[in-house]
Amino acid sequence: MRLLVINPNTSQSVTDKIEAVARPAAASATELDFVTAPYGVPYIATRAEAIIGGRVVLEVMAERAGSYDAVVVAAFGDPGLGGARELFDVPVVGLAEAAMLMALPLGRRFSIVSFSSRLEPWYRECVEWQGLQGRLASIRMLDAKVADVSRVQQENEDLLVALAQRAADEDGAEVVILAGAPLAGLASRVHDRVSVPLVESVAASIKVAEALVTLQPRKASSGSFSLPPSKPSSGLPAALERAIAHGA
């Protein structure tokens, strides 16, 4: 089994954190490759930045089409997830989606905790896209100033732990997701400091991707995730132009 993990942020330090969590989570026979966005922003925090990251996801998948059994979009908020599922025939898993799916068997209601208030609207829309508003207890955010995204979890660890506990105590969360690729590894490090289960989104995405490969689902031939009709394009990277031209 070969999985491609795409970090649609430009921060190699974040990719390193993702890899440090993903490799121990993967089965021994699973091969993992990691790609960092060649352009964009150090960490995605807005809808506009998510669109840029989504384009990165499509370009990387087009360039490497046929080489992997599944793809993980390693940014919470899952930029490009829907488009990737339309255009390509392998399972595509996002951090947010996988974390929420793993949270559901652990408790009735979950909260999302992260480090920047700018992320909240995008994350809330992501919950809505999954149809899980009724299971969401709260979204709680720090308003941290991020000078170095590679240090955001170390510099804010105690505050994030306190925020997760407040989500349990005040919002009724029975599970907490520590959200955002820059927080990869934090949940496993602090799980004994919060009274409810914490979900590690990177590990969750790897396990969901492995499960989907094992299930061997077919590519949809009808519905919104079937292959779009073929059409010409211009000005796009050659591999992405070919993917769009291939079409149904």
Image (spheres, rainbow, N blue to C red):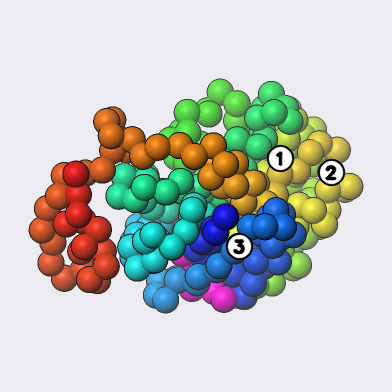
* Distance (Cα) linking label 1 and label 2: 9 Å
Q: Name the main secondary structure of what is drawn in magenta.
A: loop
Task: Pick whichever of labels 3 and 2 is earlier in the sequence.
Answer: 3
Relative to 117, 198 lies left or right: right
Three-letter amino acid code at disc 3? Glu
Kind of residue sitting beneath label 1: Val
Tell me which corner region of the image, top left, top right, bottom left or bottom right, holds residue 239: bottom left
State if disc 2 and disc 1 touch (CB < 8 Å). Answer: yes
Say left or right for 17 vs 240.
Answer: right
Q: Earlier in the sequence, mark 1 or mark 2?
A: 1
Specify whether residue 226 is painted magenta.
Answer: no
User: Which secondary structure lies at badge 2?
Assistant: loop
Range covered by the magenta-colored residues: 8-12
Compared to residue 227, the image places residue 105 above or below, namely above
Q: Which residue is mark 3?
A: 31
Q: Residues within 10 Å of mark 2 (few under 14, many from 20)?
A: some
**Mark before the other along the chain sequence, 3 or 1:** 3
| Foreground disc of the pair 3, 2 | 3
In front: 126, or 89? 89
Q: Is residue 120 above or below residue 241?
A: above
**Distance from label 3 to label 1 (Cα)?**
29 Å
Instruction: Judge from the rendering whether residue 198 lies leftward or rightward of residue 65; answer left or right.
Output: right
Amino acid carrying label 2: it is: Val
Q: Which residue is mark 2?
A: 194
